[in-house]
Amino acid sequence: MQHPRVRYIHTPVSMSDDELVALLGGENSVDLVTVAEAVHWFDLPKFYSLVKRVLRKPGGVIAVWGYNASVTSPTLDGVVKRFYETAKPFRDRKTQYLWEGYRTLPFPFQSVGLGSEGEPLPLEIPKEMSFEGILRMLRSSSAVTAAKGQGVDLLSKEVIEELETAWGGADLVRTVTCKAFMLAGKV
């Protein structure tokens, strides 16, 4: 039984497009390209051009997904919503696609029934999380990093205390449902 080759490219690479295509197996050689929570950061025309080169024809698929909200409880959700509103001035303009749920993300691929350009497939992804897990999720926001670089602490002691109270205590594990969206297509 032959196993498919799997290649993960997850760090910035300094090479020509032709070198990257060769590294991935060559033209028309890849069955699936996936991008989770990051496509909005890419140089989309260049990325899509490379994807079209490497995807197997027919049958190769590109799938991109992200999330921009979560639901836990009305109390916590209100606190998190205020946090995101406070973070808004520090958002990078590239994250606009994410905050719009990829509805405005250019996606020049033929739909395979899992969302299409302008109409991403809505997904709900439940996950058991600790309070520390939700803090890690919030700290991972590029807006938090940008604010910190400007001397603003979006996750101050007071904000963390408010989040912990709304969470129900630091030791509680809760179900957090991420509101996600997906686009999947083929050449």
Image: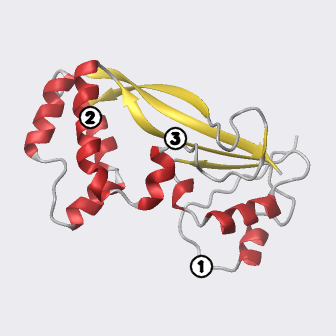
Q: Quadrant of residue 9?
A: bottom right
Assess disc 2: are there few (<14), some (14-19) or many (≥20) residues with their C-alpha within 10 Å of its C-alpha: many
Q: What secondary structure is found at the residue carrying circle 2?
A: helix
Q: What secondary structure is found at the residue carrying circle 1?
A: loop
Q: What secondary structure is found at the residue carrying circle 3?
A: loop
Measured Cα–Cα span from mark 2 to mark 3:
17 Å
Q: Position of residue 73 (x, y in %)?
A: 29, 19
Marks 3 & 1, CB-CB < 8 Å contact: no
Amino acid type of the residue tagged 1 in the rendering:
Ser
Residue at 10% x, 35% y is 161
Question: Which residue in the rendered view is the most extreme toward the right?
Answer: 58
Residue at 81% x, 55% y is 55
Measured Cα–Cα span from mark 1 to mark 2:
38 Å
Q: Position of residue 118 (x, y in %)?
A: 64, 42
- Quadrant containing the N terminus in the rendered view: top right
* Mark 2 or mark 3: whose residue is earlier in sequence: 2
Question: Which residue in the rendered view is the most extreme toward the left?
Answer: 158
Front one among 123 and 167: 123
Assess disc 1: are there few (<14), some (14-19) or many (≥20) residues with their C-alpha within 10 Å of its C-alpha: few
- Residue pointed to by mark 2: 80
- Residue pointed to by mark 3: 101
- Residue pointed to by mark 1: 14
Marks 2 & 3, CB-CB < 8 Å contact: no
Above-or-below relation of 107 to 165: below
Amino acid type of the residue tagged 3 in the rendering:
Gly
